[in-house]
């Protein structure tokens, strides 16, 4: 809105009407005058008046047409339009409102009425603009707060992962790389960014439950004893217990709980099969087994990525989700996927 005095555009082909309106309004408003529809549209686009008084019956382009054009242009669409009609004109008031006009004034004019109606609509427009800017401000604040919360969430997750790293560097580096690969697989499968964000967090934390397993077992060279393997198998449940009360906007605790489940029901701890396993967990499983098989473990040497890819291909659609396996293989074979060098700092065995 123009700061000192609002600008009102008077559109009328009749000089007497224009004079009347000018005399009524000149003390309170800046005034613009257009004597035909085309000039009115051009004036409105150029000067952005705060309100338009628009005669309906004009030669060439009538008021309805002017109104439609102003409403169709995003630069002038929000300007309030008040139609002017003569009492004896048979015009459709509904049509004017349908086109977006806010009010009608009838001729002959009553000075006080004209002033009151214009004032009312200018105040309404001012309130609308204030509301709009308040909404923008609120939206900005919400965005800022969301970014802050997101940062706190990321930092908390990083520190959780770091706690694991202090105790068990193999697992920490592994979780980072699984998160990276699982996100790449999910993106390749066309999952939405919002879903991929959840997979990233679940990936970074998926083996957090190993915190309950003695380091002597985690870092022991050679094959695990059956009893030791049984102990390892509790880690999805432990992770679930740790994460289940965090109100993530994704089912992170469930994804982590299910990352050792297998399509054919041969996994653990619940022995789920098929669609009973979350898609996110099926993706994590492929990323997990690919990373784990390709890199060094205390109990065996690194087998390399070719062996890992062969292993998931062999079980494609059996133990592992077929789409996730295809996406994972495409990433390495066609797109030269590599694990981030950053993660290699905390995982020097890569
Ligand atoms: Fe695991
Ligand atoms: Fe894992």
Image (cartoon, rainbow, N blue to C red):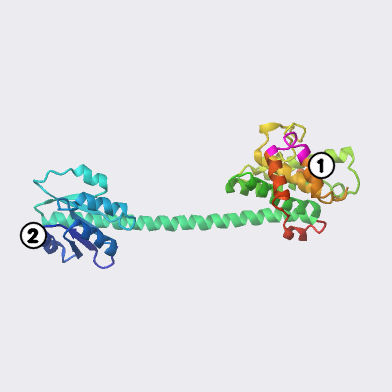
Q: Nearer the viewer, mark 1 or mark 2?
A: 2
Give x and y (percent) for residue 247.
60, 45
Q: Label 1 belongs to which residue?
A: 232
The answer to which of 262 and 313 lies nearer the viewer is 313
> In the rendered view, does 293 fall on the left or right side of 65?
right
Is residue 29 something one can see in this rendering? no
Asked if the stretch drawn in magenta spans residue 223, the answer is no
Q: Is residue 315 magenta?
A: yes
Of residues 104 and 249, which is closer to you in this image?
104
Total marks drawn?
Answer: 2
**Horizontal side, residue 70 vs residue 133: left or right:** left
Spot occupied by residue 188 in the image (x, y as percentages of width and height): 64, 47
Q: What is the magenta range?
A: 313-322
The C terminus lies in quadrant: bottom right
Give the crowd class for mark 2: few <14, some 14-19, many >=20 residues within 10 Å: few
Which residue is found at the position 87% from the left and 50% from the top?
301
Q: Earlier in the sequence, mark 1 or mark 2?
A: 2
| 34 w.r.t. 211: above or below | below
Residue 66 percent coordinates (x, y): 23, 53
Callout 1 crowding tier (Cα within 10 Å): few <14, some 14–19, many ≥20 = some
The answer to whether residue 2 is above or below residue 112 is below
Q: Which mark is residue 16?
A: 2
Q: Does residue 25 sit above or below 303 in this rendering? A: below
Q: Quadrant of the N terminus?
A: bottom left
Residue 5 drawn above or below residue 234: below
**Is the CB of mark 1 within 8 Å of ligand 1?**
no
- Residue situated in front as seen by the camera: 190 or 116: 190
Identity of the residue drawn at 69% across and 41% down:
324
Q: Is residue 23 visible?
A: yes
Please identify the residue farthest to the right as the structure is shown: 222
When asked about the image quadrant of residue 118, the answer is bottom left
């Amino acid at each position: 809105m123009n700061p000192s005095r609002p600008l009102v555009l008077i559109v009328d082909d009749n000089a007497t009407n224009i004079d009347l309106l000018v005399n009524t309004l000149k003390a309170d408003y800046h005034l613009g005058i257009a004597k035909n529809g085309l000039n009115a549209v051009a004036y409105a686009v150029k000067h952005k008046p705060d309100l338009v008084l628009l005669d309906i019956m004009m030669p060439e382009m009538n008021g309805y047409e002017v109104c439609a054009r102003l409403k169709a242009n995003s630069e002038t669409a929000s300007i309030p339009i008040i139609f002017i009609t003569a009492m004896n004109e048979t015009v459709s008031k509904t049509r004017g409102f349908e086109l977006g006009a806010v009010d009608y004034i009838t001729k002959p004019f009553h000075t006080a009425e004209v002033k009151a109606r214009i004032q009312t609509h200018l105040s309404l427009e001012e309130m609308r603009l204030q509301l709009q800017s308040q909404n923008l401000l609120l939206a900005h604040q919400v965005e800022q707060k969301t970014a802050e919360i997101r940062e706190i969430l990321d930092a908390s997750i990083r520190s959780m992962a770091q706690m694991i790293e202090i105790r068990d560097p193999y697992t920490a580096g592994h979780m980072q790389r699984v998160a990276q690969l699982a996100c790449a697989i999910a993106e390749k499968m066309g999952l939405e960014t919002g879903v991929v964000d959840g997979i990233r967090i679940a990936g970074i934390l998926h083996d957090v439950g190993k915190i309950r397993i003695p380091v002597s077992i985690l870092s022991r060279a050679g094959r695990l004893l059956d009893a030791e393997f049984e102990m390892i198998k509790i880690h999805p449940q432990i992770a679930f217990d740790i994460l289940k009360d965090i109100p993530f906007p994704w089912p992170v605790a469930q994804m982590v709980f299910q990352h050792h489940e297998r399509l054919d029901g041969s996994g653990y701890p619940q022995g789920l099969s098929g669609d009973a396993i979350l898609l996110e967990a099926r993706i994590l499983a492929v990323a997990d087994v690919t990373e784990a098989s390709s890199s060094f473990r205390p109990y065996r040497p690194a087998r390399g990525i070719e062996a890992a890819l062969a292993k998931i291909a062999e079980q494609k659609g059996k133990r592992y989700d077929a789409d996730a396996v295809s996406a994972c293989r495409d990433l390495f074979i066609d797109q030269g996927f590599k694990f981030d060098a950053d993660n290699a700092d905390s995982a020097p065995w890569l």
